[in-house]
């Protein structure tokens, strides 16, 4: 197994889906009230939760459950596809917390909600 594959496999994953009934690859399928499921995951000890997926991410952001945002901008654009956080119910008021220039040319910026 490649180092990246081994690393990503070992990380617990939580999947929110309305179309699948089971998951593998060290994953748990979230069910019921997803807002409460995310709150429960955040209350568990351990490292940060990473969030992906355009629709679910927009829901979690809209529920006010994100403590920190990290956006990585790569020096290429596809020109199509879903927009980041499309349909967000309110504007985000964020303050910069960190910036890293990556060897690939990408720039990773971290923001936190403004108090």
Image: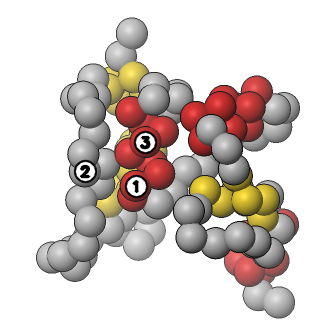
Disc 3 secondary structure class: helix
Residue 68 at what x, y percent from top left?
A: 49, 33
Q: Mark 1 and mark 2: span between their CA atoms?
A: 8 Å
Q: In the picture provided, is 50 more to the left or to the right than 7? A: left
Q: Which mark is first along the chain, 2 or 1? A: 1
In the image, is residue 97 above or below residue 13? above
- Displayed quadrant of residue 44: top right
Q: Residue at x 84, y 32 (%)?
A: 45
User: According to the image, label 3 marks what residue?
Assistant: 59
**Picture disc at residue 55:** 1
**Residue 97 in view of the camera:** no
* Numbered tag placed on residue 86 in the rendering: 2
**SS of the residue under disc 1:** helix
User: Toward which corner of the image does residue 9 lie, by quadrant?
Assistant: bottom right
Local crowd at mark 2 within 10 Å, few (<14), some, or many (≥20)?
few
Query: With 103 as the anchor, is 76 left or right in this view?
Result: left
Query: Is residue 104 visible from the viewing direction of this image?
Result: yes
Horizontally, is 17 left or right of 41 in the view?
left
CA gap between label 2 and label 3 equals 10 Å
- Which quadrant of the figure contains the N terminus? bottom right
Q: State the residue at coordinates (77%, 87%).
A: 2
């Amino acid at each position: 197994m490649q180092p990246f594959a081994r690393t990503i496999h070992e990380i617990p994953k939580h999947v929110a889906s309305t179309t699948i009934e089971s998951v593998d690859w060290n994953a748990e399928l979230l069910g019921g009230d997803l807002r409460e499921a995310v709150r429960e995951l955040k209350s568990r000890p351990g490292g940060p939760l990473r969030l992906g997926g355009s629709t679910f991410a927009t829901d979690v952001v809209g529920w006010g459950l994100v403590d920190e945002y990290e956006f990585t901008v790569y020096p290429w654009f596809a020109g199509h596809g879903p927009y980041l956080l499309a349909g967000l119910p309110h504007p985000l008021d964020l303050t910069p917390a960190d910036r890293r220039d990556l060897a690939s040319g990408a720039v990773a910026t971290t923001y936190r909600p403004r108090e």
